[in-house]
Image (cartoon, helix red, strand yellow):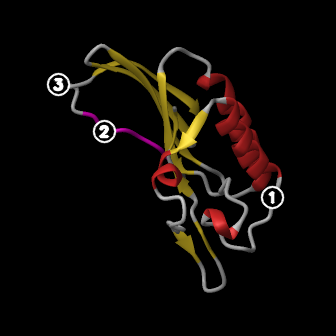
Amino acid sequence: MSGVGFLFNNKTINIENVEVVVDGRALLIDVEKNRSKFRIINVYGHTDMKEQTALFQTLQPFLCNRRQIVMGGDFNCTPETSASQGASSTVKKDSSTCALENLINDGNLKDVFRSLNPTDPGHTWSNKKTASRIFCLPAKA
């Protein structure tokens, strides 16, 4: 069973819309705070590469709006493909990695952690052989 969610204090944020993008995998919420409008997307990526790819492709149209975008969660893959960017040197590009990169690039998003920490690997996942950063927080610049 999978799931994503949000917790907000609705006394400080006006929730305008909540939409299930993919049941248990992607949820978006449109909010307004201090006359600024945001779309926040929470993602829980599949472990299956084909399912990941389909999820990232499904998310693409939801980035086309006039709101500031914040997208975060456990993507179960990383757009970083070289050790110098903080990923394990064994990370290989596959269809899901390409789909995530396309989602970030086409949505004009920037990885907030990577922007602030260009050399810190920031690993969020590891086994005894490798490590990577599968959680990321891309936001519209």
- Asked whether residue 90 is in view, the answer is yes
Marks 3, 1: nearer the viewer: 1
* Alpha carbon distance from label 3 to label 1: 43 Å
Give the residue displayed 48% in from the left and 19% down from the top: 67
Tell me which residue sits at (71%, 48%) in the image: 52
Foreground mark, 1 or 2, reads 1
What is the secondary structure assignment of the residue under circle 1? loop
Q: CA distance from mark 3 to mark 2?
A: 12 Å
Q: Amino acid at mark 3?
A: Lys
Badge 2: how crowded within 10 Å, few (<14), some, or many (20+)?
few
The range drawn in magenta is 3-8
x and y percentages locating residue 87 in the rendered image: 64, 67
Q: In what element is the residue under mark 3?
A: loop
Q: Who comes first in sequence, dot 3 or dot 1?
A: 3
Is residue 113 found left or right of 50 in the rendered image? left
* Residue 21 spot, x, y in % from top left: 58, 30
User: How packed is label 1: few (under 14 Cα within 10 Å), some, or many (20 or more)?
Assistant: some
Identity of the amino acid at label 1?
Lys
Q: Which SS does the magenta portion mostly show?
A: loop
Characterize the local packing of mark 3: few (<14), some (14-19) or many (20 or more) Cα atoms within 10 angstroms. Answer: few
Question: Which is nearer the eye, 30 or 23?
Answer: 30
Residue 82 in which image quadrant:
bottom right
Q: Tag on residue 93?
A: 1
Residue 7's disc number: 2
Residue at the image position 68 percent from the left and 36 percent from the top: 105
* Side of 115 where 130 appears, left or right: right
* Residue denoted by label 3: 11
Residue 83 magenta: no
Tags 3 and 1 touching, CB below 8 Å: no
Please state the horizontal and vertical placement of residue 72, each as a whole percent of the image: 49, 44
Is residue 23 shown to the viewer in this render?
no
